[in-house]
Amino acid sequence: MLKNAIIKSIDFFYPLFRRVMPRHTFRYAACGGANVFLDIFLYFIFYNFVLDKQVLNLGFIAFQPHIAAFLLSFLFTFPIGFLLSRHIVWTESLVLWHVQLFRYFVVVLINLVLNYVFIKFFVEYLGIYPTISKLITTVLVVIFSYLSQKHFTFRAKKAQ
């Protein structure tokens, strides 16, 4: 089964990180990191080869290539991220899958807004170099995302 193969692959590397984080957090980091890598890879492929750096004109709306590539990669990484979270990371959650999916989508939207706000704040108001601002933003958003997924999207019901 694919689920077991993914878990075994992730857990194979866990002993290297055992002193730094619990297994659950490591699985979250591994799944999230893999999904981010996939997102960047797909963005590159869509932007450079599929769209060939050209505007995507759908007739009723046109997207600049960098935005179109973002949206196209999102179409893949959103469901993959959800499935990895649901079946690999947060397996103890008893929340119905469609409720999890909605909550996951809400958290992803909030993450997008937080990325925008933090980068804008760090660069434009604090004068921090953009790459450093992106790194700081990523750390803050990952912490928010982890806590949101744990306590909101995939929360396990407490014992009665």
Image: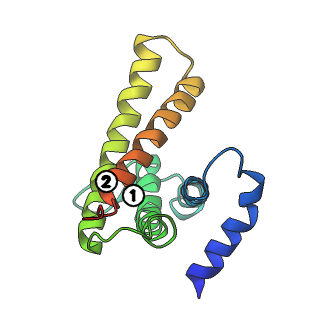
Q: Please rate how many residues cluster around mark 2, counting C-alpha atoms within 10 Å: few if below 14, some from 14 to 19, many from 20.
A: few
Q: Quadrant of the N terminus?
A: bottom right
Residue at 45 percent across and 11 percent down: it is 126
Position in image of residue 101 (x %, y %): 30, 66
Q: How is the image coloured?
A: rainbow
Q: Amino acid at mark 2?
A: Ala
Q: In the rendered view, would you say 128 is above or below 91?
A: above
Q: In the rendered view, would you say 75 is above or below 147?
A: below
* Spatial CA span between label 2 and label 1: 6 Å
Kindly give the residue lying farthest to the right in the view shown: 16
Kindly give the residue lying farthest to the front in the view shown: 160
Q: Secondary structure at mark 1?
A: strand
Residue at 41 percent across and 66 percent down: it is 82
Q: Secondary structure at mark 2?
A: strand
**Residue under label 1:** 56
Query: Quarter-wise, where is residue 7 in the image?
Result: bottom right
Query: Quarter-wise, where is residue 112 in the image?
Result: top left
Query: Is residue 108 visible from the viewing direction of this image?
Result: no
Instruction: Identify which residue, 66 or 6, lies in the foreground.
Output: 6
Residue at 35 percent across and 61 percent down: it is 154
Position in image of residue 132 (x %, y %): 59, 24
Q: Quadrant of the C terminus?
A: bottom left
**Residue under label 2:** 62
